[in-house]
Amino acid sequence: MATTVKKNPVAADGNGGNMTLTGHLKELRNRLFVVVGVFVVVVTIALANAEKGVNLLLDMSTQTTTPYTFVTISPSEMLLQYFRISLIAGAIVAIPLALFEIWAFSNPGLKRSESLFFGMALLFGLALFVIGVLFAYEITLPFMLNFLITVGVGQVSYTPTISVAEYINFVMTIFIIFGCVFEMPLLSIILAKLGIASPELMKKGRGVAIVLCFLVAAIITPPDIFSQIMVAIPMVLLYQVSIWLAGIFYKPKAKDDDEDDEDDDTDEDDAKE
């Protein structure tokens, strides 16, 4: 008669022992406190330097052929922008930290390959977001601002003025859009690693994907064709890069793996009997 040893379902802690449910909850609470604490500290520091951040965004308008004239339409408008910039800065730091804490919390229950892939995906995703924001800051936004401010100039007599709140809202929206759009290669790697998105499938759906890129760009950008094109073109190029990355990381699940899993389940059932 075979004797089976019932394994403790709880995960092992860092010292090689077993961690109880209460221990898991305490660890999760401590990691949450770290994220919240870092968020508060970053917001506080950013709030102390919010004026410099707002001026940095406003200075982008000096690159246009027709200078912007900024106005405030409420007494609290500038103060609210300081808080907006500070909260966004806190979120930019806190979100990657939260993902890192999730990885660290679940790391004892992951395989070594899974843990490594999760960590590399986290770093790659953060790098792609930063690249997307820099791309918008250096290339896309100067063209957008110059185009939008010059529309109608010379045909209609008017003085281009814009609210500080509306301007910052537009700039931050473009930053977030491009940061998220540049995550497309990471998404393709994850789907390819799971065996969902094959390079052949992505190549066949290229025409549909291009149409979807322009459709998404039309939805997430301001209602002008120029902004839509400036967002859609990088999306199409990133889709091409995603096809190449999918060809590298695509690993379909073999039938042998399924058979091995079935054999393992059968062996476990026999051992229990």
Image: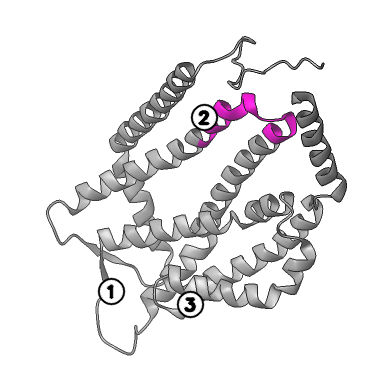
Q: Which mark is residue 226?
A: 3
- Type of residue at label 2? Glu
Q: Report the quarter where the C terminus lies.
A: top right
Spatial separation of the CA atoms under disc 1 and disc 3: 19 Å
Q: Name the residue that disc number 1 marks.
A: 160
Mark whose residue sits in front, 3 or 2: 2
Q: Which residues are magenta?
A: 99-116
User: For mark 1, does the 10 Å Cα neighbourhood hold few (<14), some (14 to 19), or many (20 or more) residues?
Assistant: few
User: For mark 3, does the 10 Å Cα neighbourhood hold few (<14), some (14 to 19), or many (20 or more) residues?
Assistant: some
- Type of residue at label 1? Pro
Mark whose residue sits in front, 1 or 2: 2
Q: Name the residue that disc number 2 marks.
A: 101
- Type of residue at label 3? Phe
Look at the numbered disc 3 and give the secondary structure of its residue.
helix
Could you tell me which residue is drawn at 73 percent across and 67 percent down? 202
Magenta span contains residue 111: yes
54 vs 4, nearest the viewer: 4
Residue 17's place in the image compared with 268, above or below, is above
Could you tell me which residue is drawn at 26 percent across and 67 percent down? 162
